[in-house]
Amino acid sequence: MQPLLSLQDISYAYHNLKGETPALSHISMDIFPGEFLAIVGPSGCGKSTLLSVIAGLLAPESGSIYCRGELLPPQTPCRSVKIGYMLQRDHLFEWRSIYRNVILGLELNHTLTRENTAYVLQLLKDYDLYAFKDKKPSELSGGMRQRAALIRTMAVRPDLFLLDEPFSALDFQTRLNVSADIANIIRSTDKTAVLITHDLSEAITLADRVLVLSKRPAGIKCEMPIRFPVGRLDPLEIRNTSEYQRYFNHLWEVLTGDESIT
């Protein structure tokens, strides 16, 4: 299968008057259509920087990026893969209703057509937010706000979802339910997703494949496919399997060890 995006030998450093801070070092990775990829690593290792490179927000200092098999010229974003970005906070605007929040991307892209409006209204119905479409964000729970943020991202019909720790602000029980809910929503639409997280359990229960990054400058220490004999609808059920414990132990050993493990 041809990758949606392919990064080959990517390196990046931040520069200021005091010198440079290397963030990424010779990273090569593929993102395949329809997969849910999780990326974990030590705090400050460069996970969000890698996501920004994937999104085309940062241009790598060296290496190559291929979009659907075609080499991208330097500092040129991929035009054939539409990207949706969910950040750590939902960033819903309090002065706009939930409906007006979720159509914001369509307004900015000048694509607020009748077809797209109908699509957004259907998403609100599908994910139990239609009754709250005229409410303000402060009137919704944290989990409902995250679903609204997801619908705002889905409204522009992206091919690739980039999720930068979007569940980190939620309490444990809400995080468990909302993360599984959003992962299943993305899977049900056959979209591709890349999740940045500090939580190994979250990565294992949500992802089809997990990449472990090293300390800064980040390199790839381990790539692990994740397979379970049970469905993914219930994250607690997954955590009670022997496979989950094996994956967790292996990834923890890689994450905390000095050497890569394959």
Image (cartoon, helix red, strand yellow):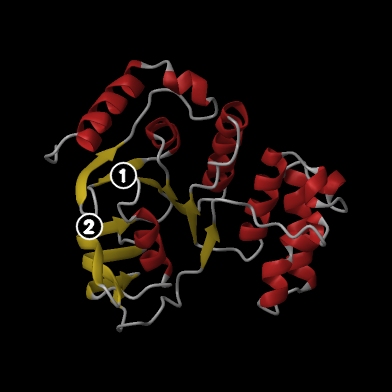
For residue 202, above or below residue 2: above
Q: Residue at x 41, y 78 (%)?
A: 77
Mark 2 element type: loop
Amino acid at the residue labelled 2:
Pro
Above or below, 23 relative to 259: below
Q: Quadrant of residue 243?
A: top left
Q: Is residue 223 above or below residue 25?
A: above
- Picture residue at 78% right of the left edge, 50% below the top: 137
Q: Position of residue 143 (x, y in %)?
A: 67, 39
Q: Position of residue 241 (x, y in %)?
A: 38, 17
Q: Mark 2 and mark 1: span between their CA atoms?
A: 11 Å
**Based on the displayed image, in which of its 4 quarters is residue 144 positioned?**
top right
The residue shown at (26%, 69%) is: 13
- The disc label shown at residue 217, or none: 2
Asked which secondary structure carries label 1, the reply is loop
- Lateral position of residue 240 relative to residue 158, left or right: left
Q: Quadrant of the C terminus?
A: top left
- In this view, the residue in front, 246 or 16, is 16
Residue indicated by mark 1: 41
